[in-house]
Image (spheres, rainbow, N blue to C red):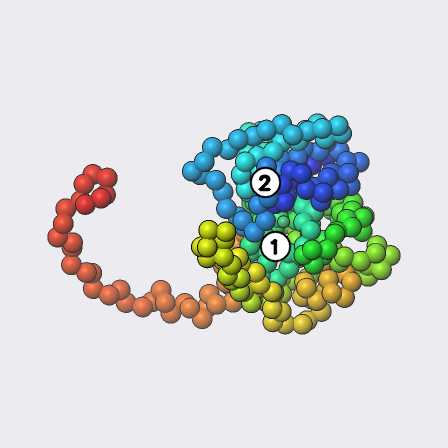
Amino acid sequence: MKILLTNDDGIHAEGLAALRDAVAEFGDVLIVAPETEQSATGHSITLHEPLRVRPAGRGSARRAYALRGTPADCVKIAVRAILKGLPDLLISGINPGPNLGVSMLYSGTVSAALEGASLGIQSMAVSLAVDSGVVPDYAPALDRVRHLVGWIKRRSLPKGTALNVNVPPIDSRRISGIRLTRQGRSRFEEFFDRRIDPRKKAYYWLDGDLVELEQGDDVDYVAVRKGFVSVTPIHTDLTDYRQLDKLRDLSDDPLPSRPAEPEYSEGADGHP
Ligand code: MN
């Protein structure tokens, strides 16, 4: 089994090393991870800077590369330029902190898995739901990762679907099991901490808390709080299917009359 690993915490992250050790028994492991931390960069890609790749393997991880780019860049370059083909499995993580509810949208960890799924790779994102500032113990997550990889190997994931996996930060024996969940409705209560730098200029630092807007048993953050490993199938289709019918009328709305042509003339490049 060819396994590609990446993350959004950077090539030196402890969670990535733990993940590598967890999956080594399943086959060939290639790591392509960001050179520096890229948490909360979402699905961004690099178009206006060169993508520098540096061999970063040591010891048992000879096939490791650090990329000066984002998690989505890592997946693309691994497939198109390093492997020149699709791996059998992509795992992104292990992120030290939850990626639940609306956090998924901002998460580089989750976006790497979605990028993998959109390229046709069986993919999952793995996060350990520790609070920030807590030193993570990855051991319980590693058992669960091995369990899920074994399952994927036997059963395989539907094309285009990735798994968003969040492990509760508790002892392995206390984990209640795996619960299939959906992304819980939530929003961020954000605030900007205003500070003054040594040159007396103000700057801001963003912080915030996830506000949970529902409490059903099938909700991702509820499952994790109750001691389950939350597994949510996700995909890149952002269509709001529930609203398609309600908005059908929009396409029947008559077009407004055309505005008058502009009076200035445009150059060949489209600029006046
Ligand atoms: Mn991260």
Q: Is residue 179 left or right of residue 7?
A: right
Among the 4 quarters of the image, the one containing residue 55 = top right
- Crowding around mark 2 (Cα neighbors within 10 Å: few <14, some 14 to 19, many 20+) is some
Which residue is denoted by mark 1 in the rendering? 234
Of badges 1 and 2, the one in the foreground is 2
Q: Quadrant of the N terminus?
A: top right
Give x and y (percent) for residue 235. Answer: 58, 53
Which residue is denoted by mark 2 in the rendering? 36
Residue at the right extreme of this rendering: 173
Residue type indicated by callout 2: Thr
Q: Is mark 1 within 8 Å of ligand 1?
A: no
How many angstroms separate mark 1 from mark 2 (CA)?
26 Å
- Crowding around mark 1 (Cα neighbors within 10 Å: few <14, some 14 to 19, many 20+) is some
Give x and y (percent) for residue 17. Answer: 73, 39
Among the 4 quarters of the image, the one containing residue 248 = bottom left
Q: Which residue: 53% across, 31% down?
A: 52
- Which of 89 and 76 lies nearest the eye of the viewer? 76
Does residue 156 show up?
A: no
Q: Is residue 83 above or below residue 47?
A: above
Q: Is mark 2 within 8 Å of ligand 1?
A: no
Give x and y (percent) for residue 139. Answer: 80, 48
Q: Which residue: 61% across, 54% down?
A: 234
Does residue 169 show up?
A: yes
Residue at the front extreme of this rendering: 199
Residue type indicated by callout 1: Ile
Q: Which residue: 44% across, 39% down?
A: 47
Q: Secondary structure at mark 1?
A: strand
Badge 1 vs badge 2, beta-carbon distance below 8 Å? no
